[in-house]
Image (cartoon, rainbow, N blue to C red):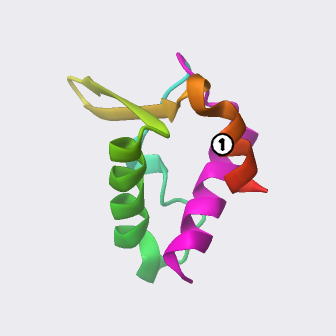
């Protein structure tokens, strides 16, 4: 699986889950549903998406939570199709 496919699948998964804005999910939950050998790469892709502004991060006492950036909704929907 290439990086672009992982980005597309990850964004599609979060759109389906409705994780926009204030609705967060743990970074540890993102690799679920991906093959075991790609789980580290999924977390790396998530870090890249945070840097690019597609994902918003929220540090908590129990780990990092992420959500989709509502300001980039149009771009995210284009990437996830």
Q: In this view, does 28 lie above or below 72?
A: below
User: What's the residue at 37%, 43% (across, down)?
Assistant: 50
| Residue 17 covered by magenta stretch | yes
Under tag 1, what secondary structure?
helix
Q: Which of 31 and 4 is in front in this view?
A: 4
Q: Is residue 26 above or below residue 58?
A: below
Q: In this view, does 78 lie above or below 41?
A: above
Q: Position of residue 19 (x, y in %)?
A: 61, 30
Q: Position of residue 80 (x, y in %)?
A: 71, 54
User: What's the residue at 49%, 40% (across, down)?
Assistant: 54
Q: Where is residue 40 in the image (x, y as percent from the top left)?
A: 34, 70
Q: Few, some or many C-alpha atoms within 10 Å of disc 1 (few <14, some 14-19, many ≥20)?
A: few
Q: Position of residue 52 (x, y in %)?
A: 40, 45
User: What's the residue at 20%, 23% (across, down)?
Assistant: 61
18 left or right, relative to 1: right
| Residue 58 covered by magenta stretch | no
Q: State the quadrant of the N terminus.
A: bottom right
45 left or right, relative to 72: left
Please tell me whether the stretch drawn in magenta is mainly helix, strand or loop: helix
User: What's the residue at 43%, 64% (across, down)?
Assistant: 42
Q: In which quarter of the image is residue 62?
A: top left
Q: What stretch is highlighted in magenta?
A: 1-22
Q: Residue furthest right?
A: 81
């Amino acid at each position: 699986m290439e990086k672009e496919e992982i980005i597309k699948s990850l964004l599609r998964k979060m759109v389906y889950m409705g994780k926009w804005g204030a609705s967060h999910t743990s970074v540890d939950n993102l690799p679920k549903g991906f093959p075991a050998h790609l789980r580290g790469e999924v977390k790396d892709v998530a870090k890249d998406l945070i840097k690019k502004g597609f994902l918003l991060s929220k540090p908590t006492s129990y780990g990092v939570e992420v959500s989709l950036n509502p300001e980039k909704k149009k771009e995210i929907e284009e990437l996830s199709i």
